[in-house]
Image (cartoon, rainbow, N blue to C red):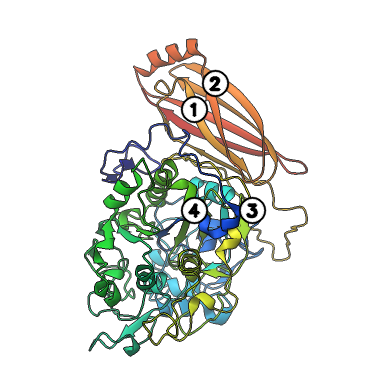
Amino acid sequence: MPPAMEAGTPRGGVWPRLLGALALLVAVLSVGAAPADATPGEGIHNIQHVIVIMQENRSFDQYFGTYPGAIGFPAGTCVRDPLHGGCDRPYHTTEQKNNGAVHSAAAAAQDIDGGKMDGFVETAETGCKADSTKCKICTEKKPHGCIDVMSYHDAREIPNYWTYAQNYALQDDMFESTASWSLVEHLELVSGWAARCSGKDANPLDCVSTLTPPRPAKEHDNWTDITYLLDKQDVSWRYYIFEGQEPDCESNEETTCNPPTQGPKTPSIWNPLVNFEDVREDGQLGNIQSLNSFFTSIHETSKCGLSNVSWLIPNFEVSEHPNDLKPGGAISVGQAYVTTLINAIMRSPCWGSTAIFLSWDDWGGFYDQVAPPKIDENGYGIRVPGIVISPYAKAGYIDNQQLSHDSYLKFIEDDFLGGQRLNPKTDGRPDDRPDVREEAPGLGNILEDFNFNQPPRPPLLLPVHPAPGPASEPPSTNPAATVSRAGGPRLQLTASVESEQELAQQGGHVDLVLGCNRSCRISATATVQAGRRSYPLTATARQLTPGHSSDVQLSLPAAQLSALEAALRHGDATGELTVRAAAAHQPLRTYRTVIHLIA
């Protein structure tokens, strides 16, 4: 079963629980599996396990538009608003559920607007009347029940994602492979193409490119996918589906519908492989499995139990899919799910030979400022976040290469298949795809995000339910403003700390993960308030190197711990944490948050 996991910032509310028995919350910051030393001469082949974690519907700017050093919101960003006049600026939102907008092929074309990237608000306003409440433009002060495509999040809502970005490799020029919605992108993810087949026979040559394919249950997909090549060379693979609901409608042109169900045997928009003819022909349908099977494999202790290539696919509840008031889709729930997966991998024998590729399948209607390159009739689509997490990933690295989700196929092929491509001329199962996406002009190589000469990095285990992280610098409203990169990005502090602490069971310790994007000195203090009495924790200070987070522990003296334990028998207590980060020629960064202590 998947591990027990409850998610969400408010703890008394009705938040989903994912059933299971693994106690991932015990010793959240304990040391995980020690990675084996890399062999520099082996290069990419140090990676024996590629794991793709694919979440849902966020543009790069919506999650990382204010990340220091990345290509985020340009100064003076303001997107035209045809319905209300004028233009709308980016704004920060703390909302756990967002609306987004229609994200079909037609919506992508309208949002991109010939490369001007100014159609996002217009798309969201389709069918609206100016006096309609739901058609008003959201702001930071009025963030709910309105159009929110100009909203953005930062470490306050997604502290773990920002911490992963700061400690591993963030890709700020990663594009959706297709200019369309989830079904099309998941087809591309496993095959390098999205097509429509005649359905009369299983001939791959009868398929033609499309951005509007039928749902998998209606027709078979006859063209060739990556599992065909993997099977030919005895490379193991699994496609793990978290059983539950999927969100999108029949064609995704509707904004509301009854979510259909998904499972390993059910053809669906997030589970297209079950409908591929070559998977059936190769007798590989059993490789499409429930997420339960992933946890069974990852918990093997004598060796790594995972296959060489794995895809981890969420259900609606943990997907981060924009949905406003419908069940599921809260970003804290999705972040908790992803953190649980990554913690499990890091604790396992697999960590020392693993590369995790974390991304989001499409833009979900949210604004992004970078115009996607035109590769062929299907793409690229709008920019999405991408993070590489591995013992060999460069620390705090921002990858500016032009990438797409096709880059994952390219990496898999280079690692396990000797560079063989999904190429009709060479793969032994020709189809009529217009090009070989892994060899598209301008496509970078994810191998650049690794350093196999560095000592392998130990696990970075993060809290599953972190408190809000530090605020980022908001986008400048001055169109004439420029950002100088000569001195590097501004100092950014990241912090991840469990929002609830069982202080007595933890021996009086509060554990934090702190990091800076440049060399900095941090100091951390905390005070616990129980009833009328305050209990100061021992302060700590240390120097941090850029791109490497550090476990920091604040402690309560033994005598005060006994008194606090007595106080906790009469009710919970709160603790206020303060962290300050200082760097040369940079303004001081201060982060404060409140944690809840329970008996």
Amino acid on which the number 4 mark rests in the picture:
Thr
The tag earlier along the polypeptide, 4 or 2, is 4
* Residue occupying image coordinates x 54% and y 25%: 554
The tag earlier along the polypeptide, 4 or 1, is 4
Amino acid on which the number 3 mark rests in the picture:
Pro
Q: Which residue is mark 1?
A: 510
Amino acid on which the number 2 mark rests in the picture:
Leu
Q: Position of residue 565 (x, y in %)?
A: 40, 16
Crowding at dot 2, Cα within 10 Å, few <14 / some 14-19 / many 20+, comes out as many
Q: Secondary structure at mark 3?
A: loop
Crowding at dot 1, Cα within 10 Å, few <14 / some 14-19 / many 20+, comes out as many
Disc 1 versus disc 2: nearer the observer? 1
Say the numbered circle drawn on residue 537.
Answer: 2
The tag earlier along the polypeptide, 3 or 4, is 3
Query: Can you say whether 388 is above or below 567 in the image?
Result: below
Distance from the alpha carbon under mark 2 to that under mark 3 = 31 Å
Disc 4 versus disc 2: nearer the observer? 2
Q: Position of residue 495 (x, y in %)?
A: 55, 40
Outermost residue, top side? 559
Q: Quadrant of the C terminus?
A: top left
Instruction: Tell me whether circle 3 and circle 4 mark residues in contact (CB < 8 Å).
Output: no
Crowding at dot 4, Cα within 10 Å, few <14 / some 14-19 / many 20+, comes out as many
Q: Which residue is mark 4?
A: 93
Amino acid on which the number 1 mark rests in the picture:
Val
Distance from the alpha carbon under mark 3 to that under mark 4 = 18 Å
Instruction: Tell me whether circle 2 and circle 3 mark residues in contact (CB < 8 Å).
Output: no
Left or right of 153, for residue 181: left
